[in-house]
Image (tube, rainbow, N blue to C red):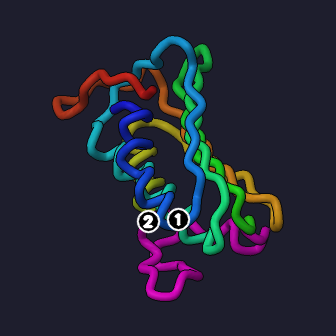
Amino acid sequence: MCIRDRSDFYRPQAEHHHIVLRTSLPDEPVYCWVDTGLIKQALLNLMTNATQAMSTGGELLLKVSARPDCAVIEVIDTGPGIEPERQDKIFQPYYTTTPGGTGLGLPTTRRIVLRHKGRIFLDSEPGKGTRFVITLPFQAARRANASEDPTR
């Protein structure tokens, strides 16, 4: 799964909402064994949430990097941020503050990341935006439905 492809796919949606979508990619591709469809869904969930949070526009950054033991994907927005008392709840099924929202996007994203033996972190401060960080281990067990794709 290529982050550049995901960015190209989502760009019209972002532009429709007056959001500038950017990518920050390393010079060399970062390869990781993943179920491409599931990781695409996880990223789409994060990008959609960011878009909903930035109702008056803003910036959305998809960033890829590598650590010695894992690939790192960051989804960063310039939205209003998430209050500390809500941060502990956002991964709970059916918890939502979005009118008409199901409260399933972030729990699903978390489940997908955990299925890949990865981790997802939240860094947010009210008034300063939100950053979700996904780490995916390079040595995750290969699955029959997984493929080695660059994350960039």
Which residue is label 2 attached to? 105
Residue 91 appears anywhere in the view: no
Q: Quadrant of residue 150?
A: top left
Percent of width and height locating residue 80: 74, 68
Which residue is label 1 attached to? 49
- Label 2 – label 1 distance at C-alpha: 8 Å
6 or 31, which is in the foreground? 6
Name the quadrant of the C terminus. Answer: top left
Q: First in sequence: mark 2 or mark 1?
A: 1
Q: Please report the bounds of the magenta region as a residue range.
A: 82-106
Residue located 56% across and 25% down the image: 25
Left or right, 39 with reference to 121: left
19 or 54, which is in the foreground? 19
Question: Mark 2 and 1 residues: CB-CB less than 8 Å, in contact?
Answer: yes
Question: Against 31, is 48 above or below?
Answer: below
136 or 37, which is in the foreground? 37
Percent of width and height locating residue 9: 35, 47
Q: Quadrant of residue 77?
A: bottom right
Asked if the magenta segment contains residue 53, the reply would be no
Left or right, 92 with reference to 5: right
Name the residue type under label 1. Asn
Percent of width and height locating residue 26: 57, 19
Q: Helix, strand, or loop for circle 1?
A: helix
Using a 10 Å C-alpha cutoff, classify the residue at mark 2 as few (fewer than 14 neighbours), some (14 to 19) or many (20 or more). Answer: many
Residue located 50% across and 56% down the image: 46
Percent of width and height locating residue 22: 58, 41
Q: Main secondary structure of the magenta part?
A: loop
Residue located 29% across and 37% down the image: 36
Extreme-bottom residue of the structure = 99
Residue located 45% across and 81% down the image: 101
Name the residue type under label 2. Gly
Q: Nearer the viewer, mark 2 or mark 1?
A: 1
